[in-house]
Amino acid sequence: FIMATDFTSSNGGKITPMFCVLAIVYAGVLLISNIITSKLIVVGGGILPAAVILFPLVYILSDVMTEIYGIRLSLIAIKTNAFLNLFMSLIFMLAIAIPAPDFWKNQDAFQTVLGSTPRMVVASLVGYFLGDATNSISLSIMKVRTKNTKFQCFFFRAIGSSLIGQIFDTFAFIFIAFYGVMPTSALLVMACSQYVTKIMYEVICYPLVNAVVKWWKKVEGIDTYDVQYAKHLV
């Protein structure tokens, strides 16, 4: 991916207290999602990772961040969160590997909940980084390209960018994590079910998200258009 620091944003790129709050919540949602992803749940007859409860919020928060503050700060947050996710996984592995006292009988449960194989860690990191970076880049470009057109509504770029980003995220994670463990047909069904669920989640949440974005822009006085970034990718 092209480094966002090579480009300038109109009326954006400022790190404010409200941006810090948004970035912290964004990181927290991602880390919690990756902790609960080891449990599988049944939704409407389909099998999905429990992370589907929360993970779509990662994309919603990423959309809000890119929409208001621009691609430079958004990509910084994405890269930082990818590192935090890796760091969390390594700490979990270390905590599991260190011997426990004989009287502590919860080692197996602890390992079941927090233990991840290297394959799952790689799947999570690759899926998240490819998906969310693609989502943010797409939204940034769409915002510039649709300015002063009938498609300038936030809905089109928020959902449109997620349609693109979630393809990379969902299918990369599912196939890296489970290829060879489950039949390919089952992987396709799981990936498609998860993809549709995530998109519907965002569509349902859109009215609230749109209201928050409008309020946030008004309070911050910031509305970023990454003009130079979009031109570079023409």
Image: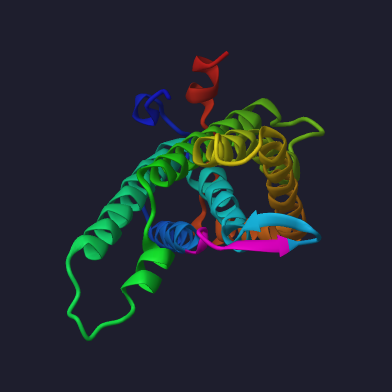
Is residue 13 visible in this depiction of the protein?
no
As drawn, 141 above or below 127: above
x then y, percent, for residue 184: 66, 33
Q: Residue at x 61, y 41 (%)?
A: 182
In this view, the residue farthest toward the bottom is 103
Q: How many marks?
A: 0
Q: Quadrant of residue 217?
A: bottom right
Residue projecting furthest to the front: 102
Per the image, is 211 magenta? no
From this view, report whether residue 161 is shown above or below residue 69: above
Q: Which residues are magenta?
A: 36-42
Q: Is residue 153 left or right of residue 173?
A: right
Rendered position, 230 above or below 224 = above
Is residue 38 covered in magenta? yes
Q: Position of residue 212 (x, y in %)?
A: 63, 62
Residue depicted at 43% across the width and 24% down the height? 1
Closest to the observer: 184 or 28? 184
Identify the image quadrant of the C terminus.
Answer: top right
